[in-house]
Amino acid sequence: MQCFRRQPKRSVSQENILREQSRRVAALNGIRLGLKDDKDLKFLLKGSQLLKVKSGSWRKERFYKLQEDCKTIWQESKKMLRSPESQIFSIEDIRDVRSGHKTEGMEKYAKDVPEYRCFSIIFKDQRKNLDLIASSEDDANHWISGLGKIIAHSNSMNQKQKLQHWIHTCLRKADKNKDNKMSLKELKNFLKEVNIEVDDYHAKKIFQHCDKSKTEALEDDEIEEFYKILTERKEIDKIFQKYSDTEGFMSCQNLVRFLYETQQEEDAVVAAPALIQRYEPNERAKRGNAMTKDGFLMYLLSDDGNIFNSSHRKVYQDMTQPLSHYLVSSSHNTYLMEDQLTGPSSTEAYIRALTKGCRCVELDCWDGPNSEPVIYHGYTLTSKILFSDVIKAIKNYAFKTSPYPVIISLENHCSVDQQKVMAQHMTTILQDMLLVAPVDGNKSQFPSPEQLKGKILVKGKKLSRQEDPTGTNGNNNLEAEDVSDEDEAAEIEDESVKTEIQQKGKSDTLKLAKELSDTVVYCKSVHFNGFEDPSHPRAFYEMSSFTESKALKLAQESGTSFIHHNIRHLSRIYPAGWRTDSSNYNPIDLWNVGCQIVALNFQTAGTEMDVYQGRFQDNGFSGYVLKPEFLRDEQTKFNPKSITEGTWGTKKKLLLKIISGQQLPKVNKSKNSIVDPKVTVEIHGVQQDNNKKQTKVIENNGFNPKWDEEFTFDIEIPALALVRFVVEDFDMSTKNDFIGQYTLPFTSLKQGYRHIHLLTKNGDPYSSSTLFVYIDIQDCD
């Protein structure tokens, strides 16, 4: 039985003092967020009763309140022995706040409540949505608007402000008796809270240095002094001193020199004054067109000091080439939230994929009750969702992240009647978004992503007598006809699935309705019967799907032929049938032969998904990346498995120094658990370029570990290479725990001293966890 220590009861005056302190802390944090005296913020800090909705029979009142740190929300729980931590969630973990009935839960279980009282909190990780009903429209608006403001203002804080906010929150947490002072014991607890282990001697030394008043407790200015010692960046001070004068200022001229010599910035003369105006906090320095150490640090922590080329954050590639010339961010079995056999299907999975930049989503369609087609993984126990609900979700979220075309990849198992319903739903729901005719009469090659902006294309089977989907020789009198069936679900390597298929009996053909056939314009699904004979070329709009093993075999044995095929035709690759756990394959080898639609399980985190998102953060996160010229050239002889001399770009040498880390997150939430970080640098590209090197382990320091280790990599084909930085918590007895990672194309690397802003395992940014590195790229002789 768990025992609880009774807390000593506080007097009324003590309670009032604590309440006033809490109010002051909340007000200070509100000012830090730029939300001084904001009505919505005040309402959230006060808290309110909300109805939490879980099902048709579970709808219960709970109290929700924004905590004084203005970054966490406390939720009341009636569960016995629930830990205090489990009653709190961070605003940083919120992806979106939706008003009304905008989730499956609200659609199903709250239709009886007016939309203006309903809202949902959507989390970044795999956590379930939090569906809530307020007692009035005003209360709902306070929550929706208040959370929206906090998220927006938190995102706009610079790294120094985020760090300050985080440290002050940790200080407040460590101040157990809430007297706004810090004893030596509280200081040691605080250091553990921020992920650093300091022995008693060093902790006492820091404490005594800061305790100018000799009162055995740090307060006010003494705590600020402690904060300065803690956040000192000696490695940056050293760089700054090299370019600054005796008064501690870096002149604009010296900043130009630093940007040009060290950062390899070509527009240094124009950039330097702009950086001073943007990041320098000292008005005197700014007026003198100079930079202080604080401004220099803020620049290095900003987007301008990022390892990723900020000009690649917008669309910068030529978007007017045929669709087949681009890699396309694509999802496999998009409807699944978990595994391939028993997990839930959800429209939320489509929303998550589309907001992550995905441009090709998959719909496995089966006959459903009441003449309404459903989507699920056939022959399995995955749950079912309505086809019409998925099409509505696609319509609402298709172009929120990117304006470029979305492809709906249909796997159709429906009867002719329900196929007609599918066609009707797509036509009536998507309306003008649905592409139903060739663009500008283009009948000889694919239109470009630019021409297809805002359009949704359907990939699927086409009636054989309507040979040309672009409309030149179709037979419009045909009602329905047998076509070959593509049944990826039947490939699942699972005994229960095989038994289900045997019992149902599976046909190799399917009767296709003309109405559904008519929705296919540029992406007609056909079986692959080998690479085409040049004397009998296949129509450009015919595309094939390959299982990963088939595609990898073709890439291995006929790389150059596959590249030529992918110049005119689209190829879709999907995971092998044995991946019932929704694991992923490596997309690199297939991109290297020009395959465009390399579909992964977006719900599964890991190296493969990190590399995937790393590739597609390029070109403005648009979901389309232009293939290198040698993968688009009709005369190309490039073969990634057998690289010969050619116009594949200049070979490069990457010189890389891992200098330090900052505010790495705790892996184990236990107060006494401190990480032992090490960094691995991986190169993913053609076989000759694949490589990895790792630093030593730094024991008991996740707050400001220092490595100062140099590595060199030779890069044969820079245009196909990606660089991945992985930070792990070293464990001698078990597998290392993942801390964070960042992956980017080699061609998006910035040189000089750069910060890497680490991502979680789900690909979301940590608020202030970074690596500090030095990059130098040289041409190989």
Image: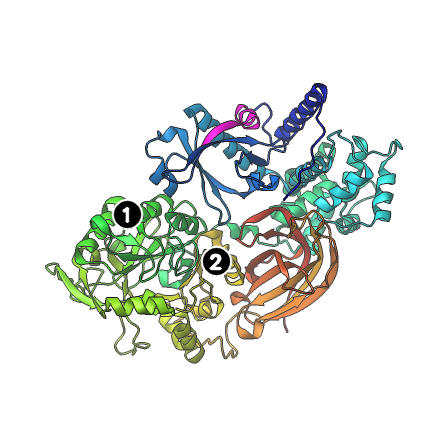
Q: Which residue is mark 1?
A: 388
Which secondary structure dominates the residues rendered in magenta?
helix
Boundaries of the magenta span: 39-51
Residue furthest right in the image: 214
Q: Position of residue 633 (x, y in %)?
A: 41, 70
For label 2, the crowd category at 10 Å Cα-Cα, with few meaning under 14, some 14 to 19 and many 20 or more, is some
Local secondary structure at mark 2:
loop
In the displayed structure, 29 sits above or below 572; it is: above
Q: Position of residue 168 (x, y in %)?
A: 70, 36
Q: In the rendered image of this protein, does residue 781 appear above or below residue 147?
A: below
Identify the element where label 1 is drawn.
Answer: helix
Residue linked to disc 2: 604
Q: Quadrant of the N terminus?
A: top right
Does residue 80 appear to the left or right of 564 in the view shown? right
Along the line of sight, the residue nearer the viewer: 269 or 259? 259
Q: Residue at x 38, y 34 (%)?
A: 100
Seen at 50% across and 55% down, the residue is 618
Which residue is outermost to the left? Answer: 477
Left or right of residue 327: residue 218? right
Q: Amino acid at mark 2?
A: Thr
List x then y, in percent, for residue 54: 42, 40
Colouring used for the render: rainbow
- Count of residue discs: 2
Assess whether residue 50 is covered by the magenta stretch.
yes
In the displayed structure image, the side of residue 764 where residue 256 appears, left or right? right
Which of pointers 2 and 1 lies earlier in the amino acid sequence?
Answer: 1
Which quadrant of the view contains residue 714? Answer: bottom right
